[in-house]
Image (cartoon, helix red, strand yellow):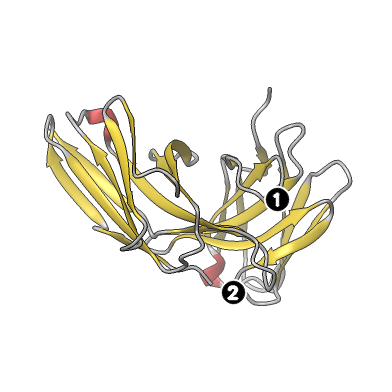
Amino acid sequence: KAGVTQTPRYLIKTRGQQVTLSCSPISGHRSVSWYQQTPGQGLQFLFEYFSETQRNKGNFPGRFSGRQFSNSRSEMNVSTLELGDSALYLCASRILAGSYNEQFFGPGTRLTVL
Amino acid sequence: GENVEQHPSTLSVQEGDSAVIKCTYSDSASNYFPWYKQELGKRPQLIIDIRSNVGEKKDQRIAVTLNKTAKHFSLHITETQPEDSAVYFCAAFSPFSGGGADGLTFGKGTHLIIQP
């Protein structure tokens, strides 16, 4: 079974631009979560999608948004990029939401904002 | 919401010695505690987990202990080897509680360095 995949793996943008990241979960997994990872801050939760609905959201500004499609693939969008948005963005999938089951991470997208 | 504190942020041990990483959590309803290992340039991967109805779990050289009363849990690695060098994250899962959705809250990570 293929693992969680993310595209692109690396991205360089300039301040003020917007970016869209994509995540394809493991086949059969319906929940996709997004995290921002920066040195010293660990894994900060952005949001979780399940059955095309956002069911949980972390403390990030409205510039960060996401969506999920009927095939469970998810996209994350960041508008009006700031230097501080430079980070590794990880997505993770699990079978269901509402009860705990192992969360599998993708390889991440490294975003650099210049 | 849940808050997870993890200590230390950096831990350096001699190869062959033991390493212990500690985490505390705030939500007494949290019932599942996974540990993830992230090697340099790689994705986090689950190495061991424990549910709230168990006090200790062991898998070869790694073990996790949970004290529900004190709301803390720890990762123990014995006979450390160079390949144990990585960043380790603890996490706590809070179940759905009516007012909000469930989810995992991560600690900030511990950079474990194994000195040869």
Q: Position of residue A64 (x, y in %)?
A: 69, 69
Q: Position of residue A111 (x, y in %)?
A: 57, 56
Point 26% across, 28% down: residue: B61
* Tag 1: amino acid: Ala
Depth check, front residue: B43 or B94: B94
Point 22% across, 29% down: residue: B82
Q: Quadrant for the N terminus of chain A, please.
A: top right
**What chain is tagged by disc 1?**
A
Q: Is residue A113 left or right of residue B24?
A: right
Q: Would residue B66 be visible to someone looking at this image?
A: yes
Q: Is residue A85 left or right of residue A65?
A: left
**What chain is tagged by disc 2?**
A
Depth check, front residue: A8 or B57: B57
Q: Would residue A114 be visible to someone looking at this image?
A: no
Point 61% across, 73% down: residue: A60
Residue A59: numbered disc: 2
Residue A97: numbered disc: 1
Point 27% across, 54% down: residue: B22
